[in-house]
Amino acid sequence: MQAAILHGREDVRIEQVPVPKAGRGELVVQVGAALTCGTDLKVFRRGYHARMIVPPALFGHEQAGTVVEAGEGVTAFAPGDRVVPLNSAPCGQCYYCLRGQENLCDDLLFNNGAYAEFIRIPERIVARNTLRVPDHVPLEHAALTEPLACAVHGFEDSFPRKGDIVAVIGGGPLGLMILHVAALAGYETIALVKRDGQAEAARQLGAAHIVQSPTIRKAIQDARALTPSGRGVDIAIEAVGMPETWQEAVELVRKGGTVNFFGGPAANTHVSLDTNRLHYSDITLRATFHHTPEICRKALELIASGRFQAGAFITGRANLYELNRVFENLMNRKSEIKTAIVP
């Protein structure tokens, strides 16, 4: 089969590799659609991901498809089933799993290889984090389950209360998803974005206010001005992953507000925060990573409900051999949201 192999920094090659076989408890899935994402773009730029992938390796992690082979012992799925196999599964036995923090599992198993004609799904992911796709849901929409689960987790982990104003910094796919999730939940939202395409998408996805300013500091000032008495928002979710936006996010919230550092900066990145403001304004700082099996089920249910505008997040389609061009467009900001790679 054809598959994308990550060899290093900005080095992805489409190669001929053996079609995988299903071992005990495993599945082989024919990929119906694989989606580009910000994490894959970071991996493409850096050539690795410390927790998810070490080259040379099969590449890509957001996908949905059809089961073509079920290994010995698999009873929940059969060939012909439409499924979304998530990109990870926790062990269920470690300290963190037993405390309900499965996203922090000491033995979190990741799976890559979505940019390919077929993908092997490990036994643990089959058992704990593979979901059946309802007949009415297109596979490319179902493939949004993984990033949407991260967005739902980030929003819920900010502990919103009725009447809160929620600001999302960043107009990338995850920022827009968090914004949409918050709007669907009935919260007044402020989108802080850079480009016209992001502003248009935010408006479509339910932003009550859109701030498009030349600098992050000006954007913070303009967003605060939209709140009662300029006091600041109740919740600020940083979905950029840059040190400067982490620092400025703290200036966006009111006294007693919550900042969620959702965006993940590069390793060994450090920021300076005003400890006086944090202490005397009683500001809560949080950070949200990844997802859990329970949240993945919530995400697919939201997609299947039709309330979530799945189609708005898929702005292009391409063949597998075009993957490098797609990533170049993402790097040059010629693509606004996600491209569905259809092997």
Image: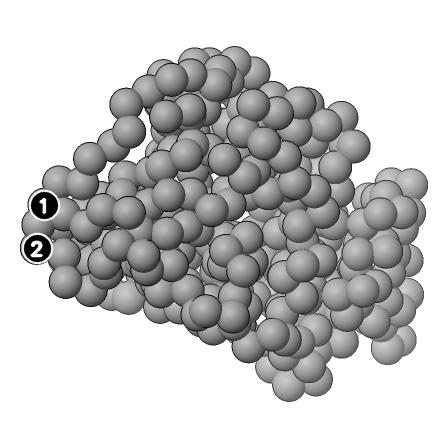
Give the residue type that dot 2 points to.
Gly
Residue furthest toward the bottom?
Answer: 162
Answer with mark 2 or mark 1, whichever residue precedes in sequence.
1
Question: Does residue 155 appear left or right of residue 224 in this picture?
Answer: left
Q: State the residue in front, 268 or 5.
A: 5
Residue beneath the point at 20% across and 35% down: 21
Q: Nearer the viewer, residue 88 or 191?
A: 88
Q: In the picture shown, does residue 9 fall above or below 220?
A: above
Where is the N terminus found, in terms of image quarters? top left
Residue 54, numbered circle: none
Residue 62 at x, y percent in the picture: 47, 45
In terms of secondary structure, where does tag 1 sit? loop
How far is the residue under mark 2 from the one under mark 1? 6 Å
- Amino acid type, callout 1: Arg
Where residue 215 appears, x then y in whole percent?
87, 41
Q: Which residue is mark 1?
A: 24
At label 2, counting other C-alpha atoms closer than 10 Å, the crowd grade (few under 14, some 14-19, many 20 or more) is few
Q: Is residue 294 above or below residue 273?
A: below
Q: Quadrant of residue 264?
A: top right
Mark 2, residue position: 73
Residue 276, visible in the rendered structure: no
Which residue sits at x=72%, y=47%? 315
**Left or right: residue 159 compared with residue 217:** left
